[in-house]
Structures are given as C-alpha cells and as structure tokens.
Image: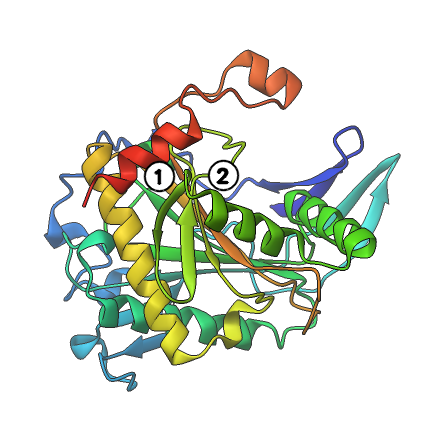
Amino acid sequence: MVELRRDPIRNKWVIINTNRILEQDLGITTHKHIDEKICPFCYGNEYMTPFPILSQNKQGQNVSDKKWDIRVIPNRNPILAIEGNLSRRPEGMFDVMTGIGANEVIIETPNHNKQVYSFTNEELSNVIKVLQGRIRDLKNDIRLEYILPFKNYGQAAGEIIPHSNIQLIAMPIIPKNVKEELDVSKKYYEIKERCLICDIIDQELKNKSRIIYENNNFVAFTPFASISPFEVWILPKEHAEDFKNINSGKVYELAQISIEVLKRIYKALNDCAYNMVMHILPLKQDYLSYYHWHIEIVPKISRTTGFEIGTGINVNQVLPEEAAKFLRDME
C-alpha cells in the first residue's frame, strides 16, 4: 500500500509506503565492502535490476546493457510508483492521496568503487545532462508537481547499494520545505523587486569568509545559518530559475565545482556520509522571477537530538566561517 497522508498539525504530507523494506532488515553493516559480483549496479548484473529507462555511452548515444557508461532504471522498491490514477479523498478530518509519482535511479558509472570526487568533469557533465533529460521527460506527466534529485552517500545518509548513483523522486505535491522556500522568496521579491538568493550570493561574494570555491558561473559556500556542521550550498552566480535548461558550458562548470567541493569534503571529513539534494523549479512552472535553483550538501557528522525534533531548531557545533576556511584549505 502506498498513499500520501496530510499531517494537519505540521501541515505537511507524509508518504506511507508499506511495500518498502526497512534497511535494518537487510542485514547491511557497512557500505564499503559489498562484493561487486552481487552489486546490481555493476557490469554483468543488469539482470538484477528492472529494464532500463535509458542506457548511454560516453558520447551520449543509446547503447546495449553491455556497453553502457550511465544507466537509468526504475527503483525496484520505489517510494512512489508511476502506475495508477491520482485521486484525493477525505478520511474523517484527514486528507489522503494515492501514492502516484516516479522513483528513478541514475547509475552514474559502471565502476563499482568510483565516487563523484574522482570523476572527470566530462563524466559528471554527462550525468548532469542525463538528469536534465529525465526531468524534461517527467515534466510531461500532468499528475506530477515536483521532482527532487538527491544523492545518499554512506550508510549513515541512507545509502543502500554502495555504488555511485543519484535518485530522483517525482511527486504529485510540492513538498512543504520547497513551498516555504518559494513563499519566502516570493515575499522578498514583492518587497524589494530582487531575488533573495541573488542578494545572498552578492553578499557572500563580497564578504568572502564563507566562500569555499568559485568558478566563472558557480559559487560554493557554507550558509550563514548552516543547519549542520559543514553544510555547503552550490549555486549559479547569475539568476537562474530553471536547472533543466542550463547549457553545456554551464553544465561543465557545475560538474567542475561539484567535484571540487566533494573532493574537499572527502579529504576534510575522512570520507564521511552525506546527503546531497537539488532544489529546482516546480514542474508546472516554466519561469519564476523570484526563484533560484541550488544544491545543498549536508555531511552526516552530527546526530538529531530531542531538542531539534521538538523545536525544529537545528544546533550546529561548527562556526560556518571556520568550516569554510577548513574546506578552502583542503586543496
């Protein structure tokens, strides 16, 4: 059974999916030592996964399973599934929606032990272009409202199969966190007639103390009020609301800065687990003057406490300026 239920107190949707297996039940103890022979994302094990949505070589050409460099598959154990009709219904005072959506896995490389920080710029550029293509394709499904691309690296971050991949989940709703971000950005724009994130980027570029790395079109910094130690954001310097349409030159620079940041996190934090999420434009929108897409990276080096659960207030033990300096020095 898969459905969405609205929490009337927190005013947010929760996905109830009884089809998914709890990670604890799988008996996985570490994400480092799974045998390549039983990894479903490795060459030769294609039969262990659902039929691919896409299978591509380095030149971006569609190829057979035996010659692929990037492969896109449906998640065998999806959070939301593409089949079925979207419907809403009341259940007493509560709201319920069918669990319609999509959950795809982009296998970024056939190399079992290769991680993003060791990719070439060209390799990651190809992955980003595939991600753009999947977002464009799923945008055509009128049932869907939002897509969240994300990476879980390491068991502490929720990684199940230790082979470099990106997941994307398409939903029939706009998640509360994203909606609040959109609402705040819209109100700021209505008052100042400027993009909130553009103003933040301008201040960070002038201040410099939280900047980790930048190239011509992108900047990476630790946010002023980072929610956890060593949180990093990667953003386009110029106003950009639509990730799926950035051109090849900017894709290459996005790949370059992403590799650089992840390499520094790997060195500085001893290959710690992390979550990486991308906030993009809602699918029903083609342009929002107040919205600015971006990437958030949150290393998993602190635990959530009762105080944080009870108040919604995060406690960060590392000054963002010191975290930025530490990562800057990791060349």
> Could you tell me residue 304's position as x and y percent?
48, 20
The residue lying at 27 percent from left, 30 percent from top is 27
Would you name the residue on which mark 2 appears? Answer: 223
Q: Residue type at mark 2? A: Pro
Task: State how far apart marks 2 and 1 are (Cα).
Answer: 16 Å
Image position, residue 186 (x, y; %): 76, 54
Image-based side of 243 in relation to 43, left or right: right
Report if the CB atoms under discs 2 and 1 are less than 8 Å apart: no
Q: Is residue 330 visible?
A: yes
The x and y percentages for residue 163 are 23, 52
Q: State whether residue 154 appears in this view.
A: no
Which residue was labeled with disc 1?
A: 274
Mark 1: give few (<14), some (14-19) or many (20+) Cα within 10 Å: many
The circle drawn on residue 149 is: none
Name the foreground residue: 316 vs 302.
316
Ranked by sequence position, the earlier of labels 2 and 1 is 2
Q: Residues within 10 Å of mark 2 (few under 14, many from 20)?
A: many
| Residue type, mark 1 in image | Tyr
Kindly indicate the quadrant of the structure image that contains residue 22. Answer: top left
Judging depth in this view, the residue of 204 and 157 nearest the camera is 204
* Outermost residue, front side: 206
Reply above or below: 22 against 220.
Answer: above
For the view shown, which residue lies furthest in the right direction?
A: 93
Q: Nearer the viewer, residue 35 or 245?
A: 245
Number of marks in picture: 2
Q: Residue at x 70, y 69 (%)?
A: 284
Answer with left or right where residue 17 lies relative to residue 172.
left
Q: Is residue 269 above or below residue 19?
A: above
184 to 30, vertically: above or below: below
Q: Position of residue 64 (x, y in %)?
A: 23, 82
